[in-house]
Image (tube, coloured by chain):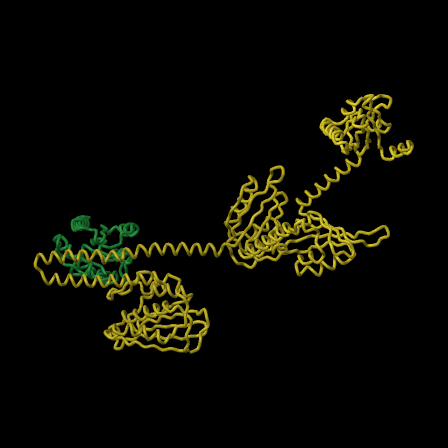
Amino acid sequence: MDASLLQLLEKTRRIGTWRVDLKENRLLWSDVTYEIHEEDPSREVTLDEAIEYYVPEHRSIISSCVFAAIDERKPWNVELQIRTTTGKVRWVHAIGEPFFEGDELVGLQGMFEDIDQRKRLELEREFTLQRLQEGERIARVGHWRLDAPGEVFEWTGGMFRLFERSGDRGSPRFDEVVAHVHPDDRAGFEAAMRGTEEFSSEFRIVVDGETRFLRTEGRPRLDDDGTFLGFAGVAVDDTVRRRAQRQVEELNRRLSLALDASAVGVWDWRVDTGRLVWDERSLALYGLEPNEFSERFSAWTAYVTEPDRGPLVDALHAASADGSSVDVAFTIQRGDGAVRTIQAIGDAVAGSDGRVVRMIGVQRDVTEMLQTQRELERSNEELAQFAYRTSHDLKGPLVSIRRLAEFASEDLREERPDDVLRGLSMIEERVDALGSKVRGILDAARADLADTPDEPVAVARLVDDVLALHAPLAGERPVELTAQLDGQTHPHLPRGRLEQILSNLVANGVRYASPERELSFVRVRVSCGPRAIELSVEDNGAGLPDQDPDAPYQMFRRFHSDRSGSGLGLFIVKKHVDAMGGTITHRSSAAGTVFELVLPLAVEGVPC
Amino acid sequence: MLNSVLIVDDDETDRHLLMRDLTRIRVDAPVLECVDGDEALRLLSRYGPDAEESPPRLIFLDINMPVVDGFGFLDAFAKLREQRGALKACRVLMFTSSDLPADRERALGFAFVAGYLVKGEARPGELDRAIQGALAV
């Protein structure tokens, strides 16, 4: 090679040459080789020193390359790192070959290229690609390119991952991608990809039957003349965020529904400024429009009636002072005059300095709840009393039966057969009374059970059946039983309840018939309207004392010493009427008693 | 001496049982019977200043009765005693199946109620002691 040409080449690409003369045991370096090693060109470098320039981890590589080259008489070609005399580490491309005279190895020669910049760029690129892939994986991002008018995408690993497509299959054709796009989004996807404008849209794709949201951005690639070459873009899997967003929206909607349904209002008291913010539900609790509330703390307490106002103000101030919670119930008078009971619950919120700056809480109208609670307590009390009264009323007859039996055996021993018979007959009576009491208690307990469904009831037949049931006893007295029905319908009613009501009322009429009447009667009238049935049972019997109108419906309440009775009949009737949401009233005088009932129908009556 | 006894109870069997117990402990005074408080009050109001006989010294009183119950009777009788001096000598022994402490306390709150016996639980000996106690006052 021409020496000057070689020098030119050396300068352009920083390629140095070297030669080892084994006969003279000398190493010769070109200028550029000295430059690459940053070595003084006047200094002669030995062969051993030349090896020492390689970084320690690469020395064995170059040695084995050289020995292999000599053995096999072929050149070597490796990229290795050297450390220059100034301590710089740089990449070099080392090429060399042994040369022989006959079979004798006489020297080595080769060239040295400084490839440090290229090698570093290469390594950096590799590292950048790795980071890109890692970033794509973590961020669930993919990059893509599409040439115009392109039929095949160019995808990075991230895109393959988003579509769960194996890299072995290569980048997909345009129509393959379209097939993955959700049918509703296909038109938009194709329009964006076939256009030339920058876009940023969300497309749904379906992968393995699962829908994913891909936020996709495409930027036009233009050449120097501004000619559109295609798109380069990025796609981000937005599914997780969309799901989270949907969940937050759902939670908010549910919270709002829950607050609406439970009519719970929110309040927020800025302790430092005294401002009190209410949401529309809080305002509704007080019967206020948004512009009717001044947002002052004092405006709240103004609605609170005495004696609750003072304790409420004290409780709120105490909680705000020591950072505790508050749970108070108080009575208010609303703007429209209605008196309600409100429960307010709240927590103190401390600022960064630990001082309480506000209290946030909820409030709700508990008027009905308290009322229900009181009713429940009353009902429990009634239940406890019922249990006591029933056990006590069952015990009574049992005690006397036992004593009668004792006396009977005593009479038997002392040979008083008449007294024995009398005692036995009394025992029989008591047993009958006990039986009827047990039946009454069972009926009363059943009246409390709610699982009696509405069904179409043939009222005429039911009335006939009830009257037939009481006909034998009525015949003895005698008492005339009659019934009159208006509006022939099959109303929807709990049949069992209606039967019990009617039967108890008719039984009372027969039992308490007055012996002084020439003709005793019990008259049943039923009038079936579309929304309610009206029932009246009238007798001309002994009548009820003129006292508390609720008294006859109380448990074990009896008014006649001369007739037997469990004292449960009207109690049972009242339970059934209450369960049906109806009403019962009575009028009574020396002429007799009329019970009047209204029983509402859940379903309008069906004409026969 | 025990002139006569009044039993106020709507339950015929219970009246019968009490009378047999009285016979057993040799209380042989005549027994008057009333079926409720109202009937008893009407009977007792007849013992005015001109009455030939004195009212029964001992009244057995049930609580759970129709029309006027035991407490209704006690309230009305407390007033009647103020009008009819002859009734001041009457003593009431409760004879009831109620073992409610509230009932016992309420009944014994009347000065003229001398005892509280629970039906079926009071044995003849206890009945005897209660009668002696009532008459000793």
The quadrant in which the N terminus of chain A is found is top right
Q: Nearer the viewer, residue A124 or A413?
A: A124
Q: Is residue A71 above or below residue A504?
A: above
Give residue A466's quadrant in the image: bottom left
Q: Nearer the viewer, residue A209 or A355?
A: A209
Total numbered labels placed on residues in the image: 0
The quadrant in which the C terminus of chain A is found is bottom left
Image coords of residue A163 (percent x, y)? 66, 52
- Taking the image as shown, residue B82 lies to the left or right of residue A379, namely left
- Taking the image as shown, residue A445 lies to the left or right of residue B26, namely right
- Looking at the image, the residue that sits furthest to the left is A415
Q: Is residue A449 above or below residue A298?
A: below
Image coords of residue A174 (percent x, y)? 72, 56
User: What's the residue at 73%, 51% (across, down)?
Assistant: A154
Q: Is residue A101 above or below residue A296?
A: above
Give residue A390's quadrant in the image: bottom left
User: What's the residue at 41%, 55% (across, down)?
Assistant: A376
Give residue A207's quadrant in the image: bottom right
User: What's the residue at 37%, 54% (across, down)?
Assistant: A381
- Taking the image as shown, residue A241 lies to the left or right of residue A450, namely right
Image coords of residue A450 (percent x, y)? 40, 62
- Taking the image as shown, residue A459 lies to the left or right of residue A144, namely left
Q: Nearer the viewer, residue B32 or A438?
A: A438
- Looking at the image, the residue that sits furthest to the front is A102
The colour chain B appears in is: green
Q: Chain in yellow? A: A
Q: Nearer the viewer, residue A408 or B95?
A: A408
Image coords of residue A438 (percent x, y)? 28, 61
